[in-house]
Image (cartoon, grey):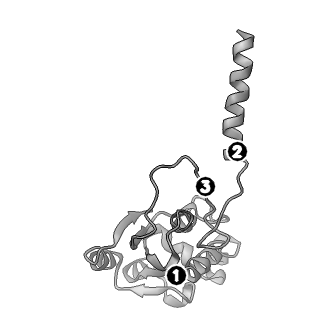
């Protein structure tokens, strides 16, 4: 039994270790949304296609002192396409932020008043914007939460509502992802 078990353990270890020893890659969104190459993947994005993606971001982060995994997931989605060879120019991403996720867009001053730290999400939003993502906030969510645009990251665009952003872009061929 030991003669069979030990080689099996070494074989499994040899197969799994390269997956864990990889360094995260950031092909489109620099510094955020790190992803890994999957050499055995047979299903991959097609670099010749145009990808139009609308992210419906309403889930708040788990810990306000850390980057929201949902905000970082937008960067991951973009980087996964980039790693598969999709050029940045063929990846059109729009993000509509509403609900509890709206607080990820607070400027540092307002975020620190609520959470005692600067907003860790703002550098991610800046990197997303530099990578070509269009970041919007729901105007209705602003009113319901007694926020003003001056309370937010200055680069965000205000949408009439999240619902109208969705009903505007989905008929234009944008795929809807809910985070």
SS type, badge 2: helix
- In this figure, what is the number of numbered marks? 3
Image x and y of residue 112, in percent? 67, 76
Q: Earlier in the sequence, mark 2 or mark 3?
A: 2
- Is there a contact, CB below 8 Å, between mark 2 and mark 3? no
Query: For the N terminus, which image quadrant?
Result: top right
Query: In the rendered image, which quarter is residue 105 located in?
Result: bottom right
Q: Nearer the viewer, residue 107 or 24?
A: 24
Residue beneath disc 2: 18
Other residues around mark 2 within 10 Å, as few (<14) / some (14–19) / many (≥20): few
Residue beneath disc 3: 37
SS type, badge 1: loop
Give the residue displayed 34% in from the left and 68% down from the top: 175
Is residue 4 found left or right of 39 in the rendered image? right
Q: Earlier in the sequence, mark 2 or mark 1?
A: 2
Query: In the rendered image, which quarter is residue 178 located in?
Result: bottom left
Query: For the C terminus, which image quadrant?
Result: bottom left
Is residue 165 found left or right of 126 in the rendered image? left
Give the residue displayed 55% in from the left and 46% down from the top: 40
Query: In the rendered image, which quarter is residue 95 located in?
Result: bottom left
SS type, badge 3: loop
Residue beneath disc 1: 132
Q: Is residue 22 above or below residue 60?
A: above
**Disc 2 from disc 1: Cα separation:** 32 Å
Is residue 13 found left or right of 157 in the rendered image? right
Q: Earlier in the sequence, mark 1 or mark 3?
A: 3
Q: Residue furthest front?
A: 48
Image x and y of residue 110, in percent? 62, 81
């Amino acid at each position: 039994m030991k003669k069979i078990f030990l080689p099996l353990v070494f074989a499994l270890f040899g197969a799994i270790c390269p997956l864990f020893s990889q360094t995260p890659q950031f092909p489109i969104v620099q510094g955020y949304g790190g992803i890994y190459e999957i050499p055995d993947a047979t299903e991959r994005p097609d670099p010749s296609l145009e990808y139009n993606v609308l992210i419906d971001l309403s889930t708040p982060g788990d810990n306000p002192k850390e980057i929201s995994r949902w905000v970082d997931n937008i960067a991951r989605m973009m980087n996964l396409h980039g790693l598969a060879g999709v050029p940045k120019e063929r990846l059109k991403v729009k993000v509509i932020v509403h609900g509890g996720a709206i607080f990820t867009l607070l400027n540092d001053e307002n975020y620190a008043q609520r959470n005692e730290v600067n907003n860790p999400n703002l550098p991610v939003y800046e990197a997303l914007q530099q990578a070509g993502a269009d970041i919007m906030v729901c105007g209705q969510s602003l009113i319901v939460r007694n926020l003003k645009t001056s309370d937010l990251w200055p680069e965000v665009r205000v949408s009439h509502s999240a619902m109208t952003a969705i009903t505007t872009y989905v008929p234009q061929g944008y795929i809807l992802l809910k985070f």
